[in-house]
Amino acid sequence: MINVSKIKKGIVLDHIEQGNGYRVFKDLRLDELDAVVVLLQNINSTSLGRKDLIKIETDYRVDFTALGLIAPHTTVNIIENGERIKKVRLELPEKVMGIMQCGNPRCVSNQEKVENIEFTLHNAETKEYRCEYCDGLTKFRD
């Protein structure tokens, strides 16, 4: 068994769906950090069976909206002095701005330079969001 020590200060992203840890690692650009980052995959979990986990030992600011889109149901643990001081369980965000692009090729946001398009969660089960411009439904990505 591999033993990874506790971190003194930073963030632990726990309960990442099995096989999704590397995608979270890439999407958050954790390889660009000048800090200790540990990605653990296929860890035994009582609630999930198997899970992935990421430890980041630095003052990293997590974009909860982006992380909620990438990996809903992830638990974010904020660590200081080796102890967890805050725990946040992520869900799909109700509103998303500046992260997604409309999937409708005829939407004005795809024809003109439109920034900060707002999308509203339409269906949590299918992870579909409604575009503020054309009312078209778009998934973040699969």
Image (cartoon, rainbow, N blue to C red):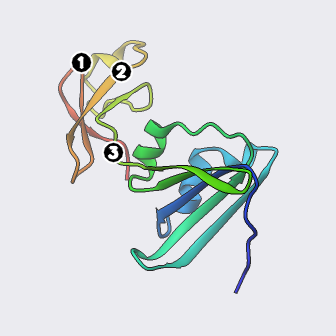
Q: Nearer the viewer, residue 76 or 119?
A: 76
Depicted 77 relative to depicted 116: above or below: below
Residue 48, x across and y down, in percent: 40, 74
Q: Are marks 1 and 2 in contact (CB under 8 Å)?
A: yes
Depicted 62 relative to depicted 98: above or below: below
Q: Are marks 3 and 2 in contact (CB under 8 Å)?
A: no
Residue 32, x across and y down, in percent: 74, 43
Q: For the N terminus, which image quadrant? A: bottom right
Q: Nearer the viewer, mark 3 or mark 2?
A: 3
Disc 3 target residue: 92
Instruction: Identify the amino acid type marked 3.
Output: Leu
Residue 41 is marked as none
Task: Measure the C-alpha gap from mark 3 to mark 1.
Answer: 21 Å
Identify the residue at image location x=48%, y=62%: 16
Residue 50, x across and y down, in percent: 47, 77
Assign a secondary structure to mark 3: loop
Q: Are marks 3 and 1 in contact (CB under 8 Å)?
A: no
Disc 2 target residue: 117
What is the crowding at mark 3: few (fewer than 14 residues within 10 Å), some, or many (at least 20)? many
What is the crowding at mark 2: few (fewer than 14 residues within 10 Å), some, or many (at least 20)? some
Disc 1 target residue: 133
Instruction: Identify the amino acid type marked 1.
Output: Tyr
What is the crowding at mark 1: few (fewer than 14 residues within 10 Å), some, or many (at least 20)? few
Assign a secondary structure to mark 1: loop
Instruction: Identify the amino acid type marked 2.
Output: Ile
Identify the residue at image location x=56%, y=77%: 43
